[in-house]
Image (cartoon, coloured by chain):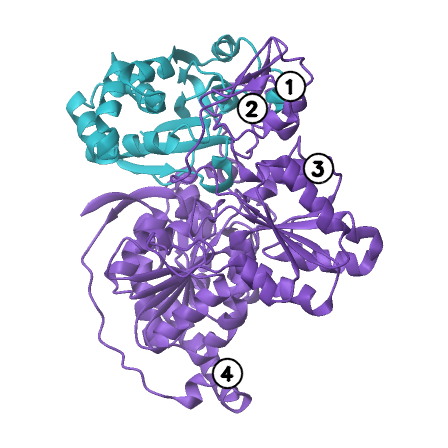
Amino acid sequence: MTVNVMIVGVGGQGSLLASKLLGHVVMEKGYDVKVSEVHGMSQRGGSVVTYVRFGEKVYSPVIDKGEADYIISFEVLEAARYLPYLKKGGKVIVNAQEIDPMPVITGAAEYPEGLLEKMSENGANVSAVDALKIAMEAGNGKAANIALMGRFSKFFGDITEEEWLSSLEACVPAKFLELNKKAFFMGRE
Amino acid sequence: MKEIMLGNKAFARGLYEAGACVVSSYPGTPSTEVTEEAAKYDEIYCEWAPNEKVAMEVAFGASLAGKRSFCGMKHVGLNVAADPLFTISYTGVNAGMIICVADDPGMHPSQNEQDSRHYAIASKVPMLEPSDSKESLEFAKLAYELSEEYDTPVIIKMCTRVAHSQSIVNTGERVLPEAKPYEKNIAKYVMMPGNAIKRHPLVEERTRKLTEFAEKTHLNFVEEGKDNSIGIITSSTCYQYTKEALGDKYPVLKLGMVNPLPVQKIRDFASKVGKVIVIEELDPIIETHCKNIGVEVTGKELFSLLGEFSQSVIAKALGEPEKEACPAVESLPVRPPVMCAGCPHRGLFYTLSKNKLRVLGDIGCYTLGAVAPLSATDMTLCMGASISSLHGFNKAMGNESEKNTVCVIGDSTFMHSGMTSLANIAYNQSNSTIIILDNSITGMTGHQQNPTTGYNIKGDPAGKIDLEALCKAMGFNRVAVVDPYDLAQTDKVIKEELAADEASVIISRRPCALLKYVKHKPSLSVDTDKCRSCRACMKIGCPAISFKDNKAHVDNTLCVGCGVCQQLCKFDALIDG
């Protein structure tokens, strides 16, 4: 069985590092894995999406509508945007942060209310986390991505803390390692 | 060693292992990382060239000199490099030469979705097409062998989903090939008519031999299926989607070499199955080939000419059941890409928009000048087109347009293709106003150095072209420099130069706000007692400014204190710190 994880957010929130970490830890666990990302223009404050797929044998690098087992979202509106990619009953792990997109900033649209409830009503199993707050407590808000990955790690009993730690060491630059380790384990608590 | 690797990084690893010595490229998503990753190996000389044509000619020179070489580009870059490509096909190579072209079905960051396979056919150059990172590494190594054996450059075609997806590869050691000493050979390398006419039949003979190779190579292989009522012919990422959607239900002929295509292998495959379906993104290249050799196939009747495919596109076309998804949450606001907080382009585009000028644009981050609320740009076509089109516009309209039309072009794009367009204005004399947006980096593709930055691909000091001196040397008397953070100065200079009776170049100079060496001021904040809710600060489309409780609000995690918004506030409500 292939596990499909989508990591979504706003360009600049660190989805590439989060997908790198997940890709590494599952590869070390012996799974086949594919990670797909989009670079370039979408990095500039736009909606970004990364796919991580792992299992015995993985062919496609992308996840289609109705296929995601998990959506990890660094922002609430972005979690809602990609909901049609989630399987019925799939899990959404969402950072409670709200970032206004340009149409909201300019007043052309409103930031929608009650998105967490709407996602649940539409069949998602939603788990909201204040990852930004956790990351600030760990020392820097920029580690919110890894704090959220810490929360996500709880859903994979067969990957041990030591294995996550060793992948963090392999993926995070040395000068940010302590911060990210702290954020990861605070998120995991 | 087993590693998870980006397709582009695996490609670079393949170049390294095969003993590549010289790499010259121009950045372009999704091709950029092949060259960036190659530059991390000290054994390979790597550089950013000013454009793809130059890069390909550099790679050719290195091949001629006897070293394995490489040049990389995005699909539209191959248009620029098409000139040398078609004739390197005739001369052939000395040491192996690989050209990487990365297509972008779906146009993630591109202005069109042209299919580069047409170039391989038109230039009669072999093209390989990997479908994941493992093949990217292996094909790079194999391509050098093919290049040397068949005396031809070899194109490796990537696409966004292969270039920018990570999968598992096995890395090996670097092995230097046998030396290829340079020998003068006028008949082979001087392409004047009398020589070229003798090379052309050799090119046709090469294609015949390569077709024989295509019949037997392991690059083109069949995977058996359970049900022979249908057989699928596919390549690249479509192979992965096919296997994901259908597993081993139907037999698959997977083509790793897409030019030239095999003939007998396709006929044999077709003879063993009922209906043959061709699955390929963009144009019907494989489909047309099959039809030309008398094999009946179904392709674009079932699949679109547009955009990217996926496993569900294929599943649906072949009548497989759809997956049950969570319904969409309705009416969500879109989140388009925006200019970053502190982007130096913002003040310049605000000034152009405020003065209601026509703006002929170019390729780079500043394409976002077309997005609301600035909505300043009238046209974007291809690299360098802003300057040449402005000249044409002004020649057509004369006085009517010269006083209210400008063009904008970034520093890297100017070096790529803007200089020749500027030479045309210097020579053919239109009263045009050209604005060079000098943010001291190639921004859109992720911060690559260029000939105006003073640094090379490794970040070491390099030659630095002086834009002012260059423009003056071309004969422009009016060359002005403005700081786009200073709205009053920018406004004044643009008005002066539009009013002038001769052509002028304005250099809008301020480094990209994301460059590490750029020191920012602290975030601004709002004095809500002074804010009159006039929304003047909202006209610049800064992602750090929003309205909360009917007052301006500055997001202190985004604001870099550039101060452009302060110059728009008549009530001094936006304050330092």
Residues at circles 4 and 1 in contact by the CB criterion of under 8 Å:
no
Give the residue displayed 64% in from the left and 22% down from the top: B569
Chain that is purple in the image: B
Residue B380 placed where, x, y %?
65, 49
Residue B527 placed where, x, y %?
56, 12
Label 3 vs label 1: CA separation? Answer: 22 Å
Tell me the tag on residue A109. 1
Amino acid residing under circle 3: Ser
Point out the tag, 3 or 4, that comes first from the N-terminus: 4
Let me know if residue B287 appears in the view: no
**Alpha-carbon neighbours of circle 1 within 10 Å: few (<14), some, or many (≥20)?**
some
Chain letter behind tag 3:
B
Tell me the tag on residue A101. 2
Residues at circles 1 and 2 in contact by the CB criterion of under 8 Å:
yes
Label 3 vs label 2: CA separation? Answer: 22 Å
Residue B79 placed where, x, y %?
55, 62
Label 1 vs label 2: CA separation? Answer: 9 Å
Amino acid residing under circle 2: Pro
The image quadrant of residue B188 is bottom left
**Alpha-carbon neighbours of circle 4 within 10 Å: few (<14), some, or many (≥20)?**
some
- Helix, strand, or loop for circle 4? helix
> Which residue is the site of mark 4?
B200
